[in-house]
Structures are given as C-alpha cells and as structure tokens.
Amino acid sequence: MKQHAFFRLGLMLFSIGLFNPPDGFAQDELPAYLKDRGDGIRTSIFGTYVRRGELLVSPFFEYYRNNDMEYKPAELGFGLDQDFRGRYRASEGLAFVSYGVTDWLAIELEVAVIRGSLYKSPNDPSAMPAKLTESGLGDRQIQFDMRVLKENGRRPEVFSYFEVVFPSNRRKLLIGTSDYEYKLGTGLIRGFNWGTLTARVALDYSKAESKIDPGEWAVEYLKRVSSACRVYLGVEGTQDEIELITEAQWHVSDNIFIRLNNAFGLTSKATDWAPDVGIMFALPVR
C-alpha cells in the first residue's frame, strides 16, 4: 500500500473510533495486574499481545532517517575495509501475522519490502557510488513466543521467544540478509496500578559469522490510559545502538487499533529517527 493511502485509511479508522468508541479492549473481570495488557501472550510488536485462538494481522509502514550511519565499503562490495559515516534513508512496508496456538504458545510471521539509499561519505575514497540505492524483499522471519510462567499476585510473568530470520536478497548487500540469523530471548512482565513493566534480554547467532553475540535488550512501560488508548515507552539496545521508543495505540473498536510509533537514537550508531504507523486487526478464529 502506498504511504499516502495508508495514512488516509488510518485517518478514516481514527474518525470511526471518535464517534464509535470501543466498549473496552481489556476484560473487566481480569485481575488488576492485567488491566494494561489483558491475558494474551507477548508478541514482537510493542505493547501487543495475542490470546489463544486469536489471529492478529497488521500491515504497517516504517521510515528510517540516519545522518551518520556507519558502513564499510568492503561489506557493500567495494573493497575498502574501513569505517565511514554516511546518510541513510529507507522506507519499508511490512506485514505481520500472529496466532495464539495455546495459552502459552504463539507463532508469528513477518515479511517486508524495502527501499534504502546510502549516501557516500565525502571521506570515502572507494569505488562506491555517491548514492547507493537498493530495493526489494526485506527480512522474512518467524518467531515462537512462549509464556513460561503466568503472573499472579506474588510473581511476574516469565516469557521466552525464539526468532529465525531467513536469507533474502543475498546479492543486495545494503538491504539483504546473507544467511540465517537466530535470536533467543527471555524476559519478565509485571503489572502494577501505575502501569506494566517488561524487561528482556536476548542472544543472537549469525550463521554467516558463526558466532554468538549479546543481542537485544529492553526495558518497557505500558499503560492503559482510557478504554480506547494505551501508551508505550521503552529503551531498547543492541551493543552500542540504543533507542528511545514511544508509541500510542488508539483502539477504534474492540478488534482494531492504530499504532503510532517513534524511535529516536540515543547513541551515535543508532538510527536517528525511525517512525512507523500500522493498523492491527484482531480476529477470533475459534
């Protein structure tokens, strides 16, 4: 879907929600510590949970703006094995699907198409063109989300997840994934009267490099502020790339909500700004 059409659809759904507010996207009979998130299993989409027998479907659009992206010409096929900083711009359309298999297991799929451009550093003497642009299929991944231990009044929820990223566009070194990549993570969720906290850590394994590295970590806050709105705030990092992430979720009905997300780089190697907007549909299938 083109970007302007996507925003028009989002505006239409937002208008519907103003005049037809949802009855309440969380079940009132749930314990107080579940009021922000409900009783679903955590997914990779911030502040989003899937329940048993529920299918989540979301198209979304993401933009990347980075004025000092670190790159090596050698890693892009241009010989020189030296670090430089260049401007990077990209737009990405993604489709996300998650299904709650049981009350402790969910499976999610995600696929993307992307167009990215890297502007060569003025200090780079390599044969790389002044502007390198590639487009095509982006990441394709599957993730298994597992609830290991349910939260109760005395202990937090314990969860785990395992992600596989498949190779794609191996000849397009700017946007492609050369080989399989794996991620194994775990975390805790605890609900309070003032909001819900999540902490998670992961390990990454790259088949191309044949090594295990410290992976993504995050500390997240989620709060249901009304019957139709939730807000999210998180700090997420991978080694020397750390981002501040904000998100607002507007529930236009019990089964549809709009996500407005922004990520801001807190360190020089993180992407400067990465907004995304999406629509999530929750479909009961059994």
Image: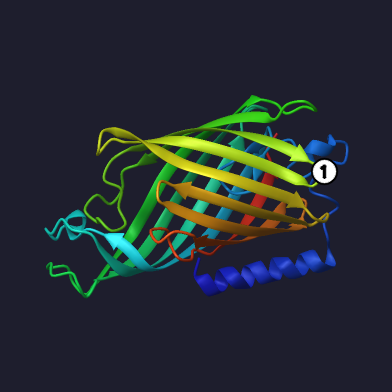
Q: Is residue 235 left or right of residue 103?
A: left
Residue labelled with disc 1: 193
Q: Position of residue 21 (x, y in %)?
A: 83, 60
Q: How many marks?
A: 1
- 67 or 19, which is in the foreground? 67
Query: Image quadrant of residue 43?
Result: top right
Q: Classify 16 as above or below 152.
A: below
On-image quarter of the C terminus: top right
Q: Is residue 39 left or right of residue 261?
A: right
Looking at the rendered structure, the secondary structure element under dot 1 is: loop
Q: Position of residue 6 (x, y in %)?
A: 57, 68
Q: Position of residue 196 (x, y in %)?
A: 72, 43
Q: Which residue is at a point 38% across and 58% down the rendered structure image?
A: 269
- 78 or 25, which is in the foreground? 78
Q: Is residue 95 left or right of residue 134?
A: right
For mark 1, does the 10 Å Cα neighbourhood hold few (<14), some (14 to 19), or many (20 or more) residues?
A: few
**Amino acid at dot 1:** Asn
Q: Classify 107 as above or below 277.
A: above
Q: How is the image coloured?
A: rainbow
Q: Which residue is at a point 70% across and 30% down the rendered structure image?
A: 156
Q: Which residue is at a point 26% across and 45% down the rendered structure image?
A: 178
Q: Position of residue 105 (x, y in %)?
A: 60, 28
- 29 or 79, which is in the foreground? 79
Q: Classify 229 as above or below 25.
A: below
- 23 or 151, which is in the foreground? 151
